């Protein structure tokens, strides 16, 4: 697995490179948002660790640019602890965030979790096993290839977005609270704001709903949570 680490703190980059290489990963490094975008395009890493505050192009704008051509899992590294900054990271397409200073063991655990869930791109039309798919209405989800189609067209989802959609589609009609979704999708003891779920739901609707403002599939149970419609 190839990991791209981009941060303008040379000492931090050196430490992350050392720790990740000890885990068996190939590590590429950069020090600016411009480098992050270029390396992501050229090297096609399996995961990116991306600092928010960097020269030239900041991490948030770099994340948005990378999302225009790749669904590689992205973990934002930020010195800011404000919930708004974390929400902005998710809005830009990040899958996760770590606030500095962080525990390297926790970071490695998050890296492993995202890599396990990373989407493997299919080739050709024979892309799904019928026994491993869920289809509700016009949406078809394949658990093995981790890909989604809407009305026969590919839907580009991040790793977190896929996990969230898979959980909802696996239990049509069941209402999940924000707390339940954080627990089951993020997987570890997540200390983030419940608005994280709202951001991901909104992004999912923008991708799978024909009219996101009037969703047909990913629905809200006001005062409770979210659910996927039954057929």
Image (cartoon, helix red, strand yellow):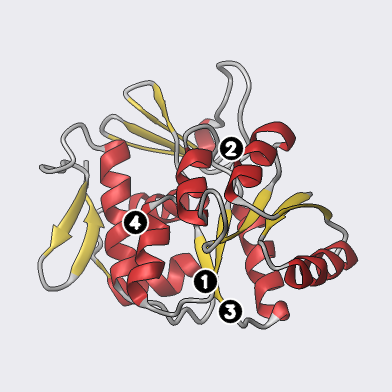
Say if residue 170 shows up in the picture.
no
Q: What's the residue at 70%, 37% (across, down)?
A: 44
Query: Helix or strand or loop: what does disc 2 sit on?
Result: loop
**Residue 227 position (above or below residue 192):** above
Q: Residue at x 61, y 32 (%)?
A: 121
x and y percent of residue 229 in the render?
21, 48
Q: Which residue is mark 4?
A: 200
**Separation of disc 1 and disc 2 at Cα?**
20 Å
Q: Is residue 34 visible?
A: yes
Q: Residue 5 occupies which quadrant of the picture? A: bottom right
Q: Are marks 1 and 2 in contact (CB under 8 Å)?
A: no
Closest to the camera, between mark 4 and mark 3, is: 3
Query: Which residue carries the number 3 mark?
Result: 100
Residue position for label 2 = 145
Residue at 28 percent across and 29 percent down: it is 138
Vertical side of 210 occupied by 125: above or below: above
Q: Residues within 10 Å of mark 3 (few under 14, many from 20)?
A: few
Q: Which mark is residue 187?
A: 1
Mark closest to the chain's N terminus, 1 or 3: 3
Q: CA distance from mark 1 to mark 3?
A: 21 Å
Q: From the viewer's perspective, is the residue at label 4 or at label 1 nearer?
A: 4
Label 1 sits on a secondary structure element that is loop
**Where does residue 206 sit, x and y in percent of width and height?**
27, 41
Work out whether residue 87 or residue 61 is closer to the camera in this orientation and state it. Answer: 61
Q: Is residue 120 above or below residue 150?
A: below
Q: Answer whether labels 3 and 2 touch (C-beta < 8 Å).
A: no
């Amino acid at each position: 697995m190839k990991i791209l680490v981009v941060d303008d703190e040379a000492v931090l980059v050196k430490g992350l490179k050392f720790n990740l290489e000890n885990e068996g990963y190939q590590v590429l490094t950069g020090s600016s948002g411009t480098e992050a975008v270029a390396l992501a395009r050229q090297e096609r890493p399996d995961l990116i660790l991306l600092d928010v505050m960097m020269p030239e192009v900041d991490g948030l704008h770099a994340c948005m640019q990378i999302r225009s051509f790749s669904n590689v899992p992205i973990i934002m590294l930020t010195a800011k602890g404000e919930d708004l900054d974390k929400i902005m990271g998710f809005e830009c397409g990040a899958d996760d965030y770590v606030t500095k200073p962080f525990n390297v063991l926790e970071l490695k655990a998050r890296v492993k979790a995202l890599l396990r869930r990373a989407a493997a791109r299919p080739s050709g039309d024979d892309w799904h096993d019928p026994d491993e798919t869920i289809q509700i209405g016009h949406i078809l989800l394949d658990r093995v290839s981790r890909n989604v189609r809407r009305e026969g067209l590919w839907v580009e989802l991040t790793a977190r977005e896929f996990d969230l959609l898979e959980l909802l589609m696996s239990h049509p009609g069941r209402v999940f609270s924000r707390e339940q979704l954080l627990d089951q999708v993020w997987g570890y003891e997540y200390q983030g704001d419940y608005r994280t779920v709202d951001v991901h739901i909104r992004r999912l609707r923008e991708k799978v709903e024909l009219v996101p403002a009037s969703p047909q599939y990913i629905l809200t149970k006001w005062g409770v949570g979210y659910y996927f419609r039954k057929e």
